[in-house]
Image (tube, grey):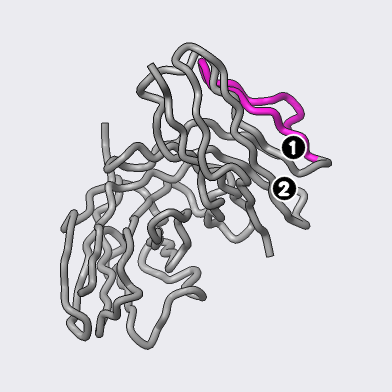
Amino acid sequence: EAEVAQSPRYKITEKSQAVAFWCDPISGHATLYWYRQILGQGPELLVQFQDESVVDDSQLPKDRFSAERLKGVDSTLKIQPAELGDSAMYLCASSQYARTKDYEQYFGPGTRLTVT
Amino acid sequence: AQTVTQSQPEMSVQEAETVTLSCTYDTSESDYYLFWYKQPPSRQMILVIRQEAYKQQNATENRFSVNFQKAAKSFSLKISDSQLGDAAMYFCAYGGSQGNLIFGKGTKLSVKP
């Protein structure tokens, strides 16, 4: 069964350093999402892509976070510089169609980030 | 803005018994979907069940069923014949016109043998 791949699974970094996460969605899925999940809470959307275009990045802290999906397939989320409050699980999800309300989102295993 | 509220941070159930997890939401939209996702410890989130708002019939998937009360904006999950593998965080999520999911804070379910 096809799955969403993410790497690394775990990342420890010092504050003020740069960090990057990678996501490879299920083949053929046009929509890709990055969520942040703080321990003990539900995921919150950071950015949504439709193919290579950003659909929603209203909750992305753009002074330090950036995301790209250059060829409309895999995606990279970057944080520079990392802050202590960025410690969280970063989840990637994909869906076949643009409207999540119609179709299921498939989640990757996540990247657990710890900023020291 | 849409919100999702799960008022039970933790729940516990005896193996083979039934448990109900609560979820309420707020929206002004008429067309939307509701979801229950399961997140086992250190494992990825998977969809448990989905409900279309325009359907009056409650969704069912094997041992999992929902009680969808649209007027009350309530969407509870019932797990029958609970199994040890059901132990996980359960998240209620709203999918509306924006295309993304809005999650509640989750309910941690423990299953006692």
**Residue holding disc 1:** B54
Q: Of the residues shown, which amino acid type is indicated by label 2?
A: Asp
Q: Position of residue A43 (x, y in %)?
A: 45, 56
Which dot marks residue A40?
A: none
Q: Position of residue B25 (x, y in %)?
A: 69, 49
The residue tagged with tag 2: helix, strand or loop?
Answer: loop
The residue tagged with tag 1: helix, strand or loop?
Answer: loop
Q: Of the residues shown, which amino acid type is indicated by label 1?
A: Tyr
The verdict on residue B61 being magenta is: yes
Question: Which residue is at 17% across, 63% downward?
Answer: A11
Q: Which region of the structure is painted magenta?
A: B55-70
Task: Assess whether mark 1 and mark 2 are in contact (beta carbons under 8 angstroms).
Answer: yes
Distance in Å between CA atoms under marks 2 and 1? 7 Å
Q: Nearer the viewer, residue A37 or A75?
A: A37
Question: Are dots 2 and 1 on a single chain?
Answer: yes
**Residue holding disc 2:** B31
The verdict on residue B23 being magenta is: no
